Image (cartoon, rainbow, N blue to C red):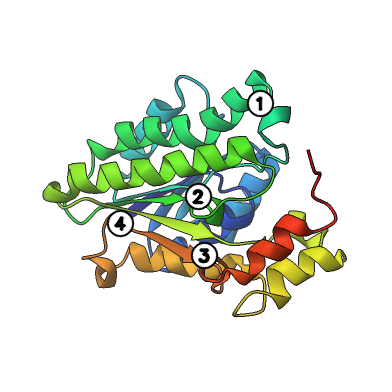
Amino acid sequence: MQVAIVTGASSGIGFGCATKLASQGMAVLGTGRDDARLEELKSHDPEHIETLAVDLTADDAPRRIVDTAIERWGRIDFLINNAGVGSPKPLHETDDESLDYFLGLMLRAPFRLAREAVVHMQPGSAIINITSTFAIVGGLRGGAYSAAKGGLTSLTRHIACQYGPQGIRCNAVAPGVTLTPMVASRLEDPRFRKINTEMTPYPRLGEVEDIASTVAFLCSDGAAFINGQEIAVDGGWTSTKYLSDFALNADWVEQR
């Protein structure tokens, strides 16, 4: 039985990835900080899913996560670095404490966990980092978020080059705006809908299943020769220049 670790598995994309991989027969260790949601995750498939409540930014987190997987199943085949949180502030409003938090959670933690896990991986294994379309194109606000996700993209390429010769692949999945409870609360805003649905070449929001299915594919034999890539799952949002003028000139943009 193949074994996958999924971080940020208590909600949203991580929850979807964990249940998707478990449905394909993998053993899954899902990590998060919400005990109740982790219990809900495990209840979806108690035969295949184990959970671990952990703060990814803690010094001992990578060792605890990897040791738990090895002690339970004796192997690690896939690591999905998913945990993250949005940052609504631009560069000039981001203090050092916020910067350290976002970089710690979305760049330092994936780095440290990959470092701990990769030594247990065998040929055919893979690391998948969940980045963002804002690691591909520029965006308003979210300076620390964009910096962290951009760094994770570069880390993806390093891992792909460094460990590819050992048969270990690394790719990134860059979701566009994906329908989660947090996003659902903004659907009444016509400007939000215009940018993220009406002006998207494939005009709808992403769904968690879109991301989870891409992750599952990258774990499959069908993706055996895909390495070092960042795949945008965004309905073509990053492929068109027509969004930029509207986005940069919308009435919510503060001119300085």
The residue that label 3 is drawn on is 211
**Vertical placement of 59 versus 116: above or below?**
above
The residue that label 1 is drawn on is 98
For the residues labelled 1 and 2, the Cα–Cα distance comes to 19 Å
User: Is residue 70 visible in the rendered structure shown here?
Assistant: yes
Please give left or right for residue 153 compared with residue 234 in the image: left
**Residue 64 placed where, x, y %?**
42, 28
**Residue 100 placed where, x, y %?**
58, 23
Q: Amino acid at mark 3?
A: Ile
Mark 3 lies on a secondary structure that is helix
Label whose residue precedes the other's in the sequence (4 or 2)? 4
Q: Residue furthest left?
A: 165
Mark 1 lies on a secondary structure that is helix
Confirm or deny contact between disc 1 and disc 2 (CB under 8 A).
Answer: no
For the residues labelled 4 and 2, the Cα–Cα distance comes to 30 Å
Confirm or deny contact between disc 4 and disc 3 (CB under 8 A).
Answer: no
Q: Amino acid at mark 4?
A: Gln
Q: Residue at x 85, y 68 (%)?
A: 190
The residue that label 2 is drawn on is 135
For the residues labelled 3 and 1, the Cα–Cα distance comes to 27 Å
Give the label on residue 2, or none: 4
**Vertical placement of 148 versus 184: above or below?**
above
For label 2, count other residues whose C-alpha is less than 10 Å away and answer few (under 14), some (14-19) or many (20+).
Answer: many
Please give left or right for residue 98 compared with residue 231 in the image: right
Label whose residue precedes the other's in the sequence (1 or 4)? 4
Quadrant assignment, res 188: bottom right
Label whose residue precedes the other's in the sequence (4 or 3)? 4
**Vertical placement of 56 versus 42: above or below?**
above
For label 3, count other residues whose C-alpha is less than 10 Å away and answer few (under 14), some (14-19) or many (20+).
Answer: many
Mark 4 lies on a secondary structure that is loop
